[in-house]
Image: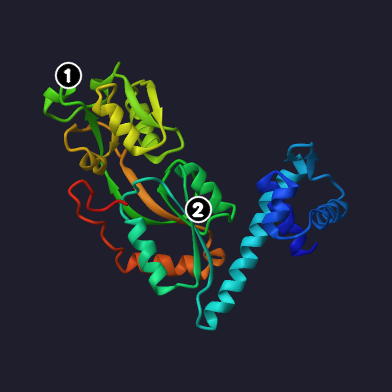
Amino acid sequence: MELRHLQHFVAVAEDQHFTRAAERLMVSQSGLSASIRALERELRAPLFVRTTRRVTLTEAGRALLTEAQRILAQVRAAHEAVAAVQGVLRGTLALGTEQCIAGVHVAGLLAAFRRRHPDVEIRLRQAGSGALAEEVAAGRLDLAFAYRTRADTEQPRSVPLTSEPMTVLCHPEHRLASAGAALAPDDLAGEVFVDFHPDWGPRRTTDAAFASAGVRRTVALEVNDVHSLLDLVDENLGIAVVPRHFARKRPALAALELKGTGEAEYETVALLPPEAATGPAARALVALLETGAPAPPRTGLAPPGPA
């Protein structure tokens, strides 16, 4: 099995199209098709279901994709390790992060990293913590800043960033705003909630807190970005339970402490693959993070810790 066959296979699987994959790889479409056929002959199984518009993975193809991505990531790490020994850090740093992650200013950290290692290509992907953990485990990401899910025993190894309590946000004219004191999940029963998709760290934290308290809640307004969530709360369309630092982004909203949730805190970490599979670029980024990541700009609305 040749590495180029695996590279070609992964490209077709990601693009779901032979022509687009061939253009990205800068090879002829006939050569790419021949490479896939050779791989299928060797494995004695079809890897794709081909149609006139797209290709999809067979069951065998899905099984191969995870291993092929892991192998290619290890090969890339090997090349980067040799370059590092020679005194030059180069290659690619594939990084993932949730929005507004606490404990690190991602943009400032990457800017500092680029100044120190200009030959490393940085690729950034934003997603929910569940997806990011899967991508790190599969070798598709070198590192990710995400929420730590205590219940997930298969989560990659992690470096702690920070933890903070969850806060209830509501419109100043909402009935809860006049409470002026900490609220328990029972106090929020029957409210209309604004929240993120279930894969996001803040949503997971809130779901766990309410489940632990035995309080059922319904998320009526589901969004995938922080500013949309704050806008909906600002229009008094619902309340939100979010990490404390989100409140600093919209000072006009009422922010109330959430009590009675046990250990339900928003904990963020840097997720990494096993030590032996961590590439030099990821190691360098973690080292830079541990020496003190750049603080975010003080603009009045920016929190002191998150990106």
Residue, disc 1? 175
Q: CA distance from mark 2 to mark 1?
A: 42 Å
Residue 86, given in percent of the width and then of the height, sits at: 54, 83
Seen at 25% across and 44% down, the residue is 245
Q: Is residue 23 rendered to the left or right of residue 250?
A: right
Return the disc, 2 or 1, that comes first in the chain's sequence: 2
Tell me, yes or no, if residue 154 can be seen here.
Answer: no
Residue 155 vertical placement versus 174 (above, below): below
Where is the N terminus found, in terms of image quarters?
Answer: bottom right
Closer-to-camera residue (213/80): 80
**Residue 171, quarter of the rendered image:** top left
Seen at 61% across and 67% down, the residue is 76
Residue, disc 2? 156
Seen at 30% across and 27% down, the residue is 232
Task: Assess disc 2: are there few (<14), some (14-19) or many (≥20) residues with their C-alpha within 10 Å of its C-alpha.
Answer: many
Q: Is residue 244 rendered to the left or right of residue 32?
A: left
Closer-to-camera residue (8/20): 20
| Kind of residue at badge 1 | Arg
Q: Nearer the viewer, mark 2 or mark 1?
A: 1
Q: Is residue 245 rendered to the left or right of residue 126?
A: left
Residue 44 vertical placement versus 251 (above, below): below
Residue 214, given in percent of the width and then of the height, sits at: 34, 23
| Kind of residue at badge 2 | Pro
Task: Assess disc 1: are there few (<14), some (14-19) or many (≥20) residues with their C-alpha within 10 Å of its C-alpha.
Answer: few
Tell me, yes or no, if residue 91 can be seen here.
Answer: yes
Badge 1 element: helix
Seen at 67% across and 60% down, the residue is 71
Badge 2 element: loop
Residue 162, given in percent of the width and then of the height, sits at: 30, 52
The single residue placed furthest to the top in the displayed view is 190
